[in-house]
Image (spheres, rainbow, N blue to C red):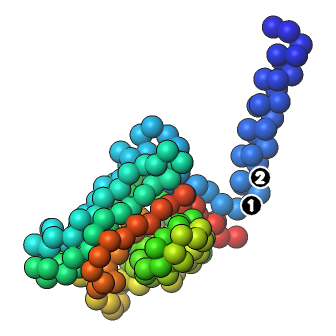
Amino acid sequence: MSRKAIYAVLGVILSLMTGEHLMKAAGYRVLFEFESVDAAAKWQTVNDGVMGGVSDGRFRISQEKTMVFYGTLSLENNGGFASVRSRPANLGLEKGDKLVVRVRGDGRQYSLNLYTPGRMTAFSYRAEFATKTDEWIEVTVPIDAFVATSFGRLVKDQPLNPDEVNGIGILLGDRKEGRFKLEVAWIRIIKSE
């Protein structure tokens, strides 16, 4: 191997190590990116069809390596929500962490949901966020700002234990019929200090 080739390889290794070092120094950890070929396998849609509704929510991984959540929200048959969520896995969340999501939306209001096993039906911890039409924004939500909900209603006395969180999702349930589209670049955690 030539000296030039060795320097090139060392340069790549150094840049990768520096990037990892910078990420740790910045205090954040990537939960989800959409660059790998199996990125879609980690996600699923759950729509109001589970309750008889007819909303159509779907997702795809774009050529730009983002997740695009899109479809049509319907209020027919007591429906009114569409969602995409990660498949169950240990997310390693801790008290004091903050969830950060980079999204480009359609001006509608969505919610971030955290899921835990063994809870009541249609249960999640939720935090709402607004989007700006066709504009990338970063939404930051402290873990302790998520509130317990079941069927979209607040549930009292159900504190969130971050260790139990095994899924994250994005839900549209703004009671406004029509088409929607939300693009997600990545989901990160800012670690507690």
| Visible residue check, residue 138 | yes
- Identified at 55% across, 58% down, the residue is 186
- Identified at 46% across, 73% down, the residue is 106
In the rendered view, would you say 159 is above or below 185? below
The amino acid type, in three-letter code, at marker 1 is Ala
In the rendered view, would you say 58 is above or below 78? above
Residue 157, given in percent of the width and then of the height, sits at 35, 89
Q: Which quadrant would the N terminus be assigned to in this image?
A: top right
Is the residue under label 1 in contact with that under label 2 (CB below 8 Å)? yes
Task: Please give the label number shown on residue 26.
Answer: 1
Q: Secondary structure at mark 2?
A: helix
- Measure the alpha-carbon separation of dots 2 and 1: 6 Å
The amino acid type, in three-letter code, at marker 2 is Leu
Residue closer to the observer: 125 or 67: 67
Residue 191, given in percent of the width and then of the height, sits at 64, 66
Q: Would you name the residue on which mark 2 appears?
A: 22
**Which residue of the protein is positioned furthest toward the top in this rendering?**
1
